Amino acid sequence: MSRLDSFIRRLEAQRACLDRAAELVRDLDGIVLELGLGNGRTYDHLRALFPDRDIYVCERQVAAHPDCVPPPERLILGDMRETLPALRPRFGGRAAVAHFDAGTGNAAANLALAAALTPNIVPLLGPGGILVTDPPIEAPELAPLPLPDGIAPGRYHLYRRT
Amino acid sequence: MSRLDSFIRRLEAQRACLDRAAELVRDLDGIVLELGLGNGRTYDHLRALFPDRDIYVCERQVAAHPDCVPPPERLILGDMRETLPALRPRFGGRAAVAHFDAGTGNAAANLALAAALTPNIVPLLGPGGILVTDPPIEAPELAPLPLPDGIAPGRYHLYRRT
């Protein structure tokens, strides 16, 4: 499989998981958290999926397409190792969906960052909230969910907060 | 359609067109030209599609994944407005497939660059050679080909040198 094949499959998996998350939380109140803005493509997809929810975006430094920059009041700038703990009083238990894709371009670095951030991501999810993530994440409060049809195991990840 | 949807469709179109080009030139001798290396994903796909052909890559400055950097003897570094004319004595009429994706990230700039380069791309293609390109390209020697099934018109482009 070429890198082009592999990249397309990853993006298809990402989109299918975001779409599935939207279905799963249809009857659940809550905000949406985009943990890592990058070029803003998935943020744009989240806007389309969740037109009626507030979407908050954490990013170290905005480098997105100008059309995909969140309004300043919903943009939380800084290193997520510092910003996420500070969000807990405001957003603890309030997220219906969180999407994590730090997009460092390095699988090992993504995995390490995800592990470091997990204790600060999980408490932001409400009960039944869905975490969609590129790297796998392990926490006692997170139950892995089956991936949408046609998505190979491990290509993207879906969890529900129990 | 979100930017994520649109990006996935573009990549699927790109891959489908490259795959189609490989079928179309199955019985045609010639090298492959990758005009714009970028991150190297399509170069990697071309390597998979054309294991027995020499693939030459034109790029201003290499910024690809280390696994996707062509060997130095097949890498032509520099601005294509200067390097392509210089290739004509060596490769004129010898390319079975050329793929053009300058990837400036700006549709208008891509289109302008494609138009400027067209007179230097076309003579490199042999008779029956296929040009796969992101921006549309117009030249009297190029006949547009139908896109593979499921690819919307204009999302990517295929031409045959008459």
Image (cartoon, coloured by chain):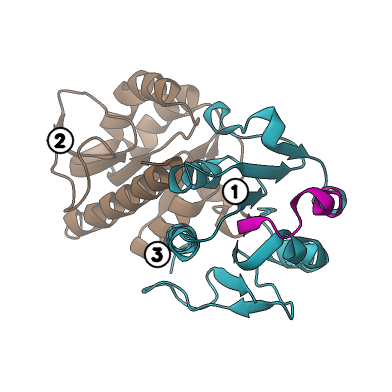
Chain colours: A brown, B cyan
Locate residue B55 relative to residue B150 in the image: left or right: right
Viewer-proximal residue, B17 or A81?
Answer: B17
Q: Earlier in the sequence, mark 3 or mark 2?
A: 3
- Pointer 1: what residue? A64
Residue A50 included in the magenta stretch of the image: no
Viewer-proximal residue, B114 or B85?
Answer: B85
From what the image shows, is residue A123 above or below residue B108?
Answer: above
Q: Residues within 10 Å of mark 3 (few under 14, many from 20)?
A: few
Q: Residues within 10 Å of mark 2 (few under 14, many from 20)?
A: some
**Disc 3 residue type (three-letter):** Ala
- Pointer 3: what residue? A48
Q: Secondary structure at mark 3?
A: helix
Distance CA(mark 1)–CA(mark 3): 17 Å
* Residue at image coords 49%, 31%: A105
Q: Earlier in the sequence, mark 1 or mark 3?
A: 3
Write down the region rendered in magenta: B83-97
- Pointer 2: what residue? A144
> What is the quadrant of residue A91 in the picture?
top left
Q: Secondary structure at mark 1?
A: loop
- Can I make out residue B100 in this image? no
* Residue at image coords 52%, 28%: B67
> Are discs 1 and 3 less than 8 Å apart at CB?
no
Locate residue A140 relative to residue A133 in the image: left or right: left
Residue B93 included in the magenta stretch of the image: yes
> What is the quadrant of residue B106 in the picture?
bottom right
Locate residue B157 relative to residue B48 in the image: left or right: right
**Disc 1 residue type (three-letter):** Ala
Estimate the x, y position of residue B159 in percent, counting from the top left: 59, 72
From what the image shows, is residue A102 above or below residue B95?
Answer: above
**Disc 2 residue type (three-letter):** Pro
